[in-house]
Image (cartoon, coloured by chain):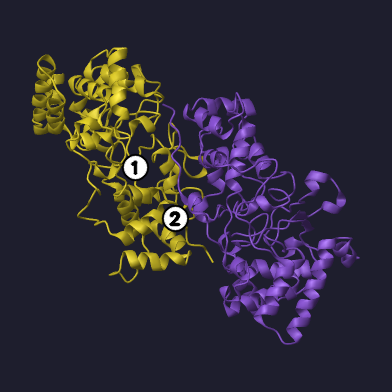
Chain colours: A purple, B yellow
Amino acid sequence: MLKLKIWKGDNIKLILFIAIFSCAAMSLGASGDEDLLQQAKQIFSPLPQVMTSEKNPVTPAKVKLGRILFYEPRISVDGTVSCARCHPIGLYAADGLKKSIGNNCKVNPRNAPTLLNAAGQISAHWIGNRADVEDQARQSVTGPPSFGMPSHEAVEAKLRGIPGYTELFKKAFPRESSPVTVDNFAKAVGAFERTLVTPSAFDSFLKGDVAALKEEEKRGLKTFMEAGCVMCHFGTYLGGQMYEKFGIFEPYWKYTRSEPIDEGRYAVTKNEADKYVFKVSVLRNVAKTAPYFHDGSVDKLEEAVWVMGKVQLNRDLTKEQVAEIVTFLKSLTGIIPEEALTIPLLPSTE
Amino acid sequence: MLKLKIWKGDNIKLILFIAIFSCAAMSLGASGDEDLLQQAKQIFSPLPQVMTSEKNPVTPAKVKLGRILFYEPRISVDGTVSCARCHPIGLYAADGLKKSIGNNCKVNPRNAPTLLNAAGQISAHWIGNRADVEDQARQSVTGPPSFGMPSHEAVEAKLRGIPGYTELFKKAFPRESSPVTVDNFAKAVGAFERTLVTPSAFDSFLKGDVAALKEEEKRGLKTFMEAGCVMCHFGTYLGGQMYEKFGIFEPYWKYTRSEPIDEGRYAVTKNEADKYVFKVSVLRNVAKTAPYFHDGSVDKLEEAVWVMGKVQLNRDLTKEQVAEIVTFLKSLTGIIPEEALTIPLLPSTE
């Protein structure tokens, strides 16, 4: 039954199965860096320069405006919430809290996922109620626990009350006569977020430089593949491409400190099969974005890896295996683009 | 009586009086850029490169650590407060709120003053209960409306719980065997803040480049001096060197939207003469740090200038005079050091 659920007609998974199978075979025979690379290339791919979107082409003017708006708290209901509040770049675009705290101390229902490499996922956030990073930005301004504004019109009034924005929006959306809108706020912020790509040693490896990963990282990669983590954490982002039940073999809350129990995607679809289903997390920069899981209920990466093995793969990973996987995961810590590490000056109200 | 209060044995003020007198005389006679410069040089001086301190020498290692700690929210009681929360550099190190909001939505008693050029003042904050920027950083970690931690020991435990800090503190305080302390947190943050110097067109002017200010800015400077604003807003920082009653001629709250009435420095000294006394604000970057006054009760710089004239100088400044002064004040918007506009990566808990 469980296996059927996992394999149901999913081509990606079939390919992964073959890849993992050959990977396991490899570990029995003569192995080498080149073999490992070939295996890895069947499962993963290096990061693009920018996470493009047909609906929202990334232009320099949009990115410039988006980077400013990312830091803009004056359009939130209490003047304290900007995108950067829950996604501070210096903390790898997550906030270190179990659950983010928004306007007027309202607690968000889930942990703030990092925005780094986030735009390449099938959707934004945890349960599939945000189509993409643009949709997330658009919804956040009126989200009760985030910016908390009463309406898009109210946000637009605040934006128009800061004179410097008029010109910036005009430059970013040159064909529009009245460009200072929440839709364009979302597009600009989204365009900025689409530049938040963090290439790491693992990308150099995937591009053919087998020496880019240290021996222990390569061992970790092999363990990561053989253990089956790649069943869900595959692709460019090592996650973010599918939804999966958290707790396939046992309820997740048996091993986390989750309180209350979150039913996940069920809240969106009301489909019984979506109970406890969440989007698979992107693992890039995972060593920098504790605490872990949708509710931040686990502090340490070692514990998170062990819990995953237990409830997703029915494996009681040994301390050594966990350590190997964590060593590999640390090689996914990437370099944040210089532009994203520069604080933009916000237009004044004068 | 009032005059006696203003003039009481204060040498700086006597010099200023002479300077303003000659300035007024100048305006009657043949005036020129060179005359204006000479007058200005008697009252103001250009910014230093760094705001040094004998007690806390500014070293690169301290600045590096301080810049990281400036963004560190994980040492606050609810994990949301860092120095940057109330002093975001992109908003010119103020937060745009009337009164800052700290941990657990606690409202600070007063407006967050900008940290730019702040270390050169006689004290930090508004009422003289913070000796300097180091003292402010030290007190903020246990300040109920700011970081809200129960004790210095609790802060130190949190700092020690983030492994990367050990090495950073060691490098910044190489002679200490156990350097991860709140005192050193304060010194490091203070050292970083001592680099937040923002030279502007006005500094170039003061250094002899009379063309650095536009004609209308020079007119504004003259009006600023002649109107008597320099009685309090003198020196390198155009303020920050003395305390003064807010409302010498009339209660300040007659013209602001202040609620409740703040008794200012009286809260510190319990001296009747200190009622409604505040530290004179630094005017550098003032056009970028709305809203104004200790309680953020005035939104617009024009209005703030007019209120100042009315209650401090008993002058009903004309619209034209206000506009001239505001034009000059805008020339005080300076360039934030590149290093301070770079987001540091925070050490992870892994």
Q: Position of residue B222 (x, y in %)?
A: 20, 22
Other residues around mark 1 within 10 Å, as few (<14) / some (14–19) / many (≥20) = many
- Tag 2: amino acid: Pro
Quadrant assignment, res A104? top right
| The C terminus of chain B - image quarter | bottom right
Q: Which mark is residue A47?
A: none
Q: Is residue B302 above or below residue B204?
A: above
Q: Which mark is residue B115?
A: 1
Task: Tell me: B184 left or right of A180.
Answer: left
Is disc 2 placed on a helix, strand or loop?
A: loop
For marks 2 and 1, give the CA distance: 18 Å
Q: Position of residue B229 (x, y in %)?
A: 22, 24
Residue at x 52% of width, y 43% of height:
B104
Relative depth, front residue between B248 and B347: B347
Tell me the residue that label 2 is attached to.
B344
- Tag 1: amino acid: Leu
